[in-house]
Image (cartoon, rainbow, N blue to C red):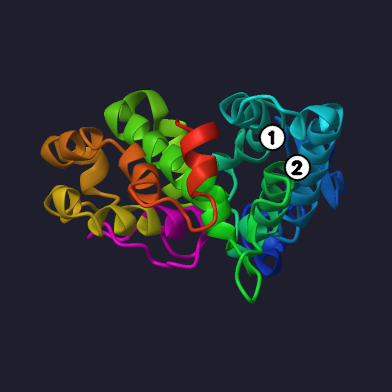
Amino acid sequence: MLRNTNLLLDFVVPAKNRNCFEGAVPGTALPSLHLLGLRLNTSNSNAEERELRINAMTRGWLQFRGFWHSSSPAPLKRLSYIVNAYSTATSGSTALALKPTDTITIDRKVVGHLRSMLKGRATDWSGRHAKTLTHIEVLRSWRLPPIALELRVQRINWWQQLAREPGSNKRLITALFGKARCEKEPTVMADGSLFDIGKSMGKLFWDDVSSLRQIDEFRAAVQDITLTTLFSDTVVRDELCAIDASILRAQLFSSSIAPWGLESFIEAEAPY
């Protein structure tokens, strides 16, 4: 439990933490703490949280280890894997600014499990040289998106909720994009751009909007989105809220051609 005598100095970059807290409140500076389901630390690193989630995925996998290699239908295995392992990596992770290193590391664990469930069918041995499915092909064969993509879809739904009810989310919006007393510059400039694009959640916001701009049917709708218009312009807000972010996920699975080496598997065992 976080008490008023324990401080986690992680509201800004580590070099500036002292400006916010030194002398403000007497207490102990903690290297990390467990708060609302997440592990926070003073280094702006997700390594500890990432390892905890990977360990939880491993426990979920081992609880059903005989089932993964059984003759049970592939759709049932997929659903069971989502519930027991995959969801432990994504649950609550929209509140984290995960870096590519974090999502790639988690993806490796996921793909390792999925390859194991294919029981050798991830590799085609019929030719002169063995050909193995890539990570993304393994994920597509099980219709599971990479962690970064799944979190992007969830995060866009989150932005839509904030935009839909800004009055009910004033504190959260202020915490994400407001200006703390210890900060010399504002997070959001008058034109809606970010003063420091490197700030974690702000960068994720722009990356999420940019991903929508890559889709022709959404490009016009998100062209004028800034952090100012998102919460003040009803037209911009309504256009964003009308977007179905799950299309980003569907694009990964849109190919009608099954990954090579798994044509019979897709037809016989995974018609989902």
Secondary structure, mark 1, is helix
Residue at point 34%, 51% (across, down):
255
Query: Which residue does the numbered mark 1 point to in the structure image?
Result: 88
Mark 2 residue type:
Arg
Residue 30 vertical placement versus 163 (above, below)? below
**For residue 3, which quarter of the picture?**
top right
State how far apart marks 2 and 1 are (Cα).
6 Å
Residue at point 69%, 57% (across, down):
108
The residue segment tinted magenta is: 181-205
The x, y position of residue 10, in whole percent, is 69, 53
Considering every residue shown, the one lying at the far bottom of the view is 128
Residue at point 16%, 42% (across, down):
236
In the foreground, 37 or 130: 130
Sequence-wise, which precedes: disc 2 or disc 1?
2
Magenta segment's dominant SS is loop
Q: Report whether 171 appears left or right of 124.
A: left
Q: Do the residues labelled 2 and 1 touch (CB within 8 Å)?
A: yes
The x, y position of residue 28, in whole percent, is 88, 46
**For residue 4, which quarter of the picture?**
top right
